[in-house]
Amino acid sequence: MALRGVRNSVAVFPAKLRLLAEYKDNKPALMIYLVTLREEATAQLAALDSGASPAEVNTRFTDWVPVRPAT
């Protein structure tokens, strides 16, 4: 199972880079987009009774975005 997780992480890396490039000047818009996708995925996973925790879904969808600390 861990190997599958690694493979999936590597497979989505180019997509994450594209999103970061596309939203490089507007990180708040990127977060809104990703949170929207996260909420859709959470609802779909709940309907499937997948057992995925909200923390796992959050990590997968939004935790990878670099944010600047508030100044």
Image (cartoon, rainbow, N blue to C red):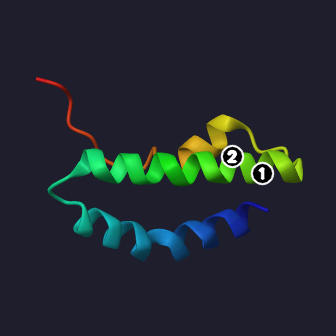
State the residue lying farthest toward the left: 71
Three-letter code, disc 1 = Leu
Q: Check disc 2: other Cα within 10 Å, few if <14, some if 14-19, many if 20+.
A: some
The residue that mark 1 highlights is 45
- Relative placement, left or right, of 67 versus 58 is left
Query: For this view, does 12 lie left or right of residue 65?
Result: right
Q: Is residue 27 visible from the viewing direction of this image?
A: yes
Say if residue 50 shows up in the picture: no
Instruction: Provide residue 51's location: percent of width, then percent of height.
Output: 84, 44
User: The residue tagged with tag 1: helix, strand or loop?
Assistant: helix
| Residue 25 pos. (x, y %) | 14, 56
**Residue 42: which disc?**
2
Q: Residue at x 79, y 62 (%)?
A: 1
Residue 64 in picture, x, y percent from top left = 42, 50
Residue 15: numbered disc: none
Residue 7, x across and y down, in percent: 62, 73
Q: Secondary structure at mark 2?
A: helix
Image point (77%, 51%), residue name: 45
Mark 1 and 2 residues: CB-CB less than 8 Å, in contact?
yes
Task: Tell how many labels.
Answer: 2
- The amino acid type found where label 2 is placed reads Thr
Task: Report the side of 20 relative to 6 (left or right).
Answer: left
* Residue found 23% across the figure and 68% down from its top: 21
Q: Quadrant of the C terminus?
A: top left
* Relative depth, front residue between 67 and 2: 67
Corner quadrant of residue 28 = top left
Q: Residue furthest right?
A: 49
Placement of 48 over or under 56, stated as above or below: below
Judge the density around disc 1: few (<14), some (14-19), many (≥20) Cα neighbours within 10 Å. some
Name which quarter of the figure residue 23 lies in: bottom left
The residues tagged by marks 1 and 2 sit, at their Cα atoms, a distance apart of 5 Å
For the point 65% across and 43% down, which residue is it? 56
